[in-house]
Amino acid sequence: MKKMFLFLILCATTFSVFSQAREEDDSGYRKVYAIILSKNGEVKHIIKQGEDISADIDGKNVNGRWFFKAYPDIVEIVDRKNEVVGEIALNQQDPLQISVPQPKSGMSVGIGVGPVSVSNMGGGMQSFNMEKWKAEISERMETKEEKLKREYYEQKEQERQAKEAAKAAKKAAKKSK
């Protein structure tokens, strides 16, 4: 009788643990990947997934956005048409050209009327000599703020697509009259 009681308690706790683990998976949070560029052991840049990258694949210079593929440093490049154009090992690219989030700031001198001004000239692509730099990929769960922002933009995109589809249907109906 005691063995049966212990067996039932063990089964109940096991099912409880598995159901809680499943609830965490179904919470809607995604993993966020980032490239960490370090030089001499000091982190210099953290680049989120989806930033612009330029690389040589099979002798061709390819531009697109990077997405995580495999550890330790394999990423795939997706072009503007959302087609995968290839994959690269970050530490084997020489040089690695990637868009960094921190803007460069500097002096802007213009000819004409007005004073000399200091301006921010966008982050843009920067080249990294991978003999001196090291690239690692980090993974974490997205924060609640990131999740809400992602869901908001996904909803806005769906609304935009529905609006375009309705507009196209209206145009087609008008054309068929």
Image (cartoon, rainbow, N blue to C red):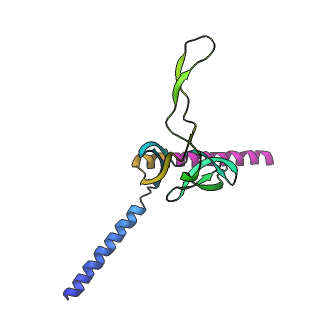
Horizontal and vertical percent for residue 131? 53, 47
Q: Is residue 21 left or right of residue 115?
A: left
Residue 9 is a magenta residue: no
Horizontal and vertical percent for residue 84? 64, 55
User: Which residue is more in the foreground, 162 or 88?
Assistant: 88
Looking at this rendering, what residue extends furthest in the front direction? 131
Looking at this rendering, what residue extends furthest in the left direction? 2
Looking at this rendering, what residue extends furthest in the top direction? 113
The main secondary structure of the magenta stretch is helix
The magenta span reads 150-177
The residue at 57%/53% (across/down) is 92
The residue at 30%/79% (across/down) is 11
Whether residue 177 is visible, yes or no, is: no
Quarter of the image for residue 21 reads bottom left
User: Which residue is more in the foreground, 153 or 137?
Assistant: 137
Q: Is residue 144 left or right of residue 81?
A: left
Q: On screen, 118 above or below 64?
A: above
Q: How many marks?
A: 0
User: Looking at the figure, which quarter contains the N terminus?
Assistant: bottom left
The residue at 61%/10% (across/down) is 113
Horizontal and vertical percent for residue 80? 65, 47
Q: On screen, 14 above or below 169?
A: below
The residue at 71%/49% (across/down) is 169
Horizontal and vertical percent for residue 177? 80, 47
Q: On screen, 75 above or below 46?
A: below
Whether residue 46 is visible, yes or no, is: yes
User: Which residue is more in the foreground, 155 or 51?
Assistant: 51
